[in-house]
Image (tube, helix red, strand yellow):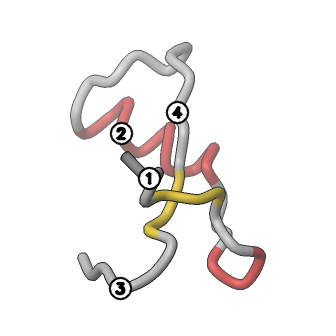
Amino acid sequence: MEDVTIPVRAQHKFSVGNLQRYLSVKLRVPSDDTLNVRQYSAGQSN
């Protein structure tokens, strides 16, 4: 199966550290877990 996600494009990048801190507080995701952010390559929506 073809991989449908790609690394985040430069124009869509945001602070993954800020997201990690937010998730740590709001969802109790451990702050030392590795967060991997990717995006759909094309033709997908949220």
What amino acid does circle 4 point to? Leu
Q: Nearer the viewer, residue 24 or 7?
A: 7
Q: Tag 1: residue type? A: Glu
Q: Mark 1 points at which residue?
A: 2
Question: Do the numbered discs 4 and 2 sit on residues whose CB atoms are within 8 Å?
Answer: yes
Q: Say which residue appears at 52% left-offset and 33% top-offset.
A: 35
Spatial separation of the CA atoms under disc 3 and disc 4: 24 Å
Left or right for 35, reference 43: right
The amino acid marked with disc number 3 is Gly
Report the residue marked by disc 4: 35
Disc nearer the start of the sequence (3/4): 4
Is residue 44 rendered to the left or right of residue 2? left
Report the residue that reaches farthest toward the right: 10
Give the labeled residue for mark 3: 43
29 or 40, nearer to the observer: 40
Secondary structure, mark 2, is: helix
Q: Measuring from the top left, give residue 3's x and y in whole percent.
A: 47, 51
Quote the CA–CA distance across marks 4 and 1.
Answer: 22 Å
